[in-house]
Amino acid sequence: MKNTAICAGSFDPPTLGHFNIIERGLKIFDTIIVGLGINLAKQPILTVAERLDLLKQILKNHKNVEVVSFDGLLTAFARAKNCRILLRGIRNMSDYEYESQMALANKALYPELETVFMMTEGQYSHLSSTFIREIIASGGSCAGMIHPLVEKMLVRKLRK
Ligand code: ADP
């Protein structure tokens, strides 16, 4: 049986921290499904189509990565994909607190589901989509934090 893991997030925008988790995850799992969760409660900067496009372009050389969006519960998405593993990145203690609660909630909804946590690599531990949006909106450079395609699209959207 092939091991498939779902790496889900809002990716608004995707950072090098996200790609680092996906690429390291590929050393453990045969296939990774990158699931872009559509959260109707959040007002995103990048549209779903823009985020999907960026993720697909940046990950295009990885044949065993599938990029797809989903709405509703992550557990329902995992069931629909017949997937029993969630891969989550952890940066610090506050990620751990949030993620551990989420893992327990997801397990209650889908008992066969296992959440696997991967520590971020040091150079990415300060990266968050929120900081990236603020830096770009304020005129700063995010070189070394996001892919150049992501920076180009963010600059276009945030500095009108
Ligand atoms: P969400 O809105 O679900 O928090 P994100 O796109 O912010 O979605 O994050 C998706 C996943 O990526 C989460 O597991 C999160 O902990 C992880 N992640 C976010 N930023 C980093 C980073 N810099 N290094 C490692 N993992 C990260």
Image (cartoon, grey):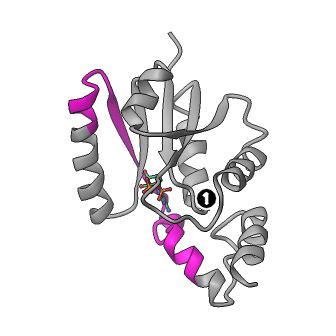
What is the residue that sits farthest to the front in this orientation?
Answer: 40
Magenta stretch in the rendered image: 106-134
Q: Residue at x 47, y 22 (%)?
A: 80
> Which element carries disc 1, helix, strand or loop?
loop
> Could you tell me the amino acid type at mark 1?
Pro
In reply to whether residue 110 is colored magenta, the answer given is: yes
The residue carrying mark 1 has its beta carbon less than 8 Å from ligand 1: yes
Q: In this view, does 160 lie above or below 85?
A: below
Q: Residue at x 53, y 48 (%)?
A: 21
Task: Please tell me which residue lies in front, 87 or 133.
Answer: 133
Residue 123 horizontal/vertical position (percent): 53, 67
The C terminus appears in which quarter of the rendering?
bottom right
Name the residue that disc number 1 marks: 14
Q: Is residue 19 above or below residue 25?
A: below
In reply to whether residue 111 is colored magenta, the answer given is: yes
Residue 93 horizontal/vertical position (percent): 27, 63
Report which quarter residue 11 is drawn in. bottom right
